[in-house]
Amino acid sequence: MRYRHSTAQSAEYLRLAVKRMTQQQAALHPVSYAVWYQYVAGLNPLLQAEVDGLLQDNRRLDDENVYALYDRHIAELDAATALRIGDSVGQLVDQVSESAAQAGHEASRFGNTLERWSDTLNEPVSAGGEIASDVADILRGTRNMQNAISTLQTRLEESRRETQQLRQEVARAREEALIDGLTGLSNRKGFDLALTTCLEQAAPDVPGPCLLMIDLDNFKRLNDGLGHVFGDRVLSSIGQILRANVKGKDTAARYGGEEFAVILPQTPRGGAIGLAEALRALVAASRVRRVGDEGPLIGNITVSIGVADYLAGESATDFVNRADRALYLAKTQGRNRVILAPRPQPAAGRQADPLPR
């Protein structure tokens, strides 16, 4: 984004942003400043709305909040803007191209008419010589106009192809920005976007959504004992298992570090548990080479998984927290297991939902 504020304006926004920053728990780093500068300058209504929501009940933003805000509303702003610009330019080129084509068609019809008139006037008529000469001039002008329109159409077609290529490149860059480089899964930003979309589209009469939170057991000990290169190999291997077994509308993501997540938009509770058990068993049965293609195979790699099924009206944060608490229980109960997050008990006097999920 290009800022067009004067020195006085930017100084005032600096003062306001720093004041806001010092009231939060997040560190005073450039990412935090970027968030608060855009907030106090009123540059980003969506950012302002989310910040205002987070600050309710005298809450204070920590680093996790700040980085999430930056990722959602600032880091991807240029790509989103470029996509909109690409769409607008593409529509403009299409409209101008259509107008040029119509003008060319009309010019061609007019030229054909003039040619017929010219042939008629060129017949031996003593009084028609001057008129025939004038029509010939008009005919030459019309042909020049046809050539110019033809050249314009050629250039517009080239512009159309270039615009389409630009839109594809921007879309590809935005997609790559949502992919984790090590595992090939969605990254944290991709997960957040997918979960938001999933919950917005959740229908009360459709089973799901369900969420799996997956954590590699004893990863620090594995890293310390066998090295970070091998640790990356293990993470990549788990990514391969998830990519091979999570398909369709479901989303597998690297949530952060050695933690993964799977969003299941239309899977009931029983199906989510079944998938979690299958993934757990596949990881437990896997073997990863320590060095290159000829190194020894290392086993005893396991994961713990927490499963949560969505509660109507639940926020994305609460949904993730319930799955995360189930994951924690799986860890404390011995690891290499799947735990389902309990559903809150209905209030006294209310009957529980009899429909299984």
Image: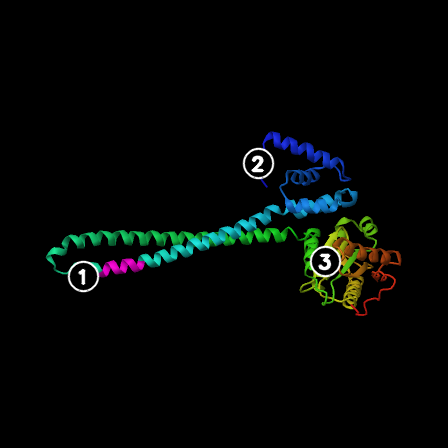
**Circle 1: residue type:** Thr
**Residue drawn 58% across the image and 53% down it:** 171
Which image quarter holds the N terminus?
A: top right
**Residue placed under numbered mark 2 in the picture:** 4
Kindly report the distance in space between the C-alpha atoms of the residues bearing marks 2 and 1. 65 Å
Residue plotted at (72% across, 58% down): 239
Q: Residue furthest right?
A: 333
Residue 113 covered by magenta stretch: yes
Image coordinates of residue 156 in percent, x first then y, are: 42, 52
Magenta segment: does it hold 111?
yes
Q: What segment carries the magenta color?
A: 108-116
Q: Say which element carries label 1.
A: helix
Q: Amino acid at mark 2?
A: Arg
Asked whether, in this view, residue 286 is left or right of residue 185, the answer is right
Q: Secondary structure beneath disc 3?
A: helix
Residue 28 shows in the view: no
